[in-house]
Amino acid sequence: MITRLWEAAPRRRTPTKQTASPPWTDTATQRSKPVLIGPWPPHPAAPTRTWLAALLTAFLANATPDAVCSAEAPPAASPEPGTVRVCPKDDGYRGIWYSNQPQNDQYVYKYSGGLGTYCAKHRPFAVYAAKVQKTFFCYGGRPKDKNELLHMVSYYDHRTGLVPRPSILLNKRTSDAHDNPVIALDERGHIWIFSSSHGTARPSYISVSGKPYSIEAFRRVYVGNFSYPQPHWIPGHGFLFLHTRYKQGRRLFLMASADGISWSRPRMLAHVQLGHYQISGRCGTKVGTAFNFHPSPQGLNWRTNLYYLETDDLGRTWKTASGQPVPTPLTSLDTPALVHDFRSEGLNVYLKDLAFDA
C-alpha cells in the first residue's frame, strides 16, 4: 500500500519570479574536530523519515550566528571529473535563507525563510547507515557574511551524540534554495551528492565520497543540468535517478546507472502541457512517483490533479498501483496514471511526501 501526503487547496493566483546566478566554483580546504550541538530530538531504534527531518531542523535551528564558515575562502579552478578533492570544513551549521514570488499582501512572499532543506521535491536529505550507526545528511548552507549557497555534507553519530564540523562540497554562487543538494548511500558505503540547479542558468553535479562512510573528500563524476533531484539507490541494481528538466516547462525525466559513474541517456517520463512537480519513494526494488500537472497557459500556480506510476526495473517499464502497464512518456491528461481529477473540482495539488507501508 502507498501512504500519501498531499494538499488540495483553493487556487491562489500569484506571480512567478526567477533569477539567474553566476556559475559554480570550488572553495579552499581545511580540517577541524567534531562539535556537539543540541538538544536533539529523541531517536527511535530505526530512524524514520519524520525523525530525520526533525534532526535536520534541530541542526539548523541550534546554529548560532557566528557558528559558520568564512566566506573568504578563495575560489579555485573547477576540478576535472575524477579528481578527488579534500573538502574544506565549516565551524558550525547555518542554513540558506530564501524567498520566492513576492506578493502584495500580508504574507509578503508566497514562501520564505530558512530553507536549508528545501524543497519537498528534493529528496532525500538524510540517510541512515546501520553499519556505522550514523545518519549522513546534506543541506544548503551559507557563510556568515553573505547569503550564498554552500552545499554541505555531514553526519550524526548515534553512538556518541556528536556531529563533526560539516564539509563544504561546493559554493553554488547563488542564494536560490532550489539549488540545494540531496544525498544517497550505496551498499558499499559511498556517499553520493546530487547538486541541483534551478532551471538552466547553472550546471548540476554528481559527486561521490573518496572513501566509504567518509565526508572528508569527494570526486565529481557528472556535470550536466537537472532540477528537483530524487535519486534512488537500489541494492544489487544501481541508481534510478528521477528529476526535472526545464524544456518547454517542467518535464519529468529519469536516468539509470549500475555504478553511479556511467549514466544512461535522459529519458522523458511525462510532459503534459506546462509540466509537473513530482515526489517519489522506494520499497525494495520498486520506485513509485506521484505528480501533478501545470495547466496551460496558467502554469505552476494552478498545479492540479494527482497521478501515480511505479517501476520495478529501473525505469524501463512503468505501471499503475494496480499493475496496469502505462506507456511513457505521458503526454495526455487522459491516462490510467490519473489517481484523482482535482482540476474538475477547482482545487490545486501541492505534493509533500510519498512512502510505502507495505
Image (cartoon, rainbow, N blue to C red):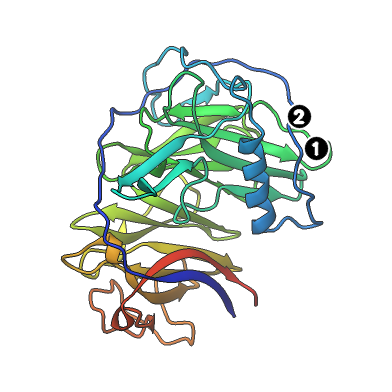
What residue do we see at 40% from left, 15% from top?
A: 75
Q: Residue at x 60, y 59 (%)?
A: 235
Q: Which mark is residue 230?
A: none
Q: Residue 317 appears in which quarter of the rendering?
A: bottom left
Q: Residue at x 36, y 81 (%)?
A: 338
Which x, y percent locates residue 275?
26, 64
331 relative position to 358: left or right: left
Q: Is residue 66 left or right of residue 194?
A: right
Q: Quadrant of residue 243?
A: bottom left
Assign the C terminus to one quadrant of the image.
bottom right
Q: Which residue is mark 1?
A: 161
| Amino acid beneath label 1 | Gly
* Residue denoted by label 2: 36
Q: Count all numbered tags in the image, as a single digit.
A: 2
Q: Amino acid at mark 2?
A: Leu
Q: Nearer the viewer, residue 74 or 219?
A: 74
Precedes in sequence: disc 1 or disc 2 = 2
Q: Secondary structure at mark 1?
A: loop
Q: Residues within 10 Å of mark 1 (few under 14, many from 20)?
A: some
Task: Indicate whether 3 appears above or below 61.
Answer: below
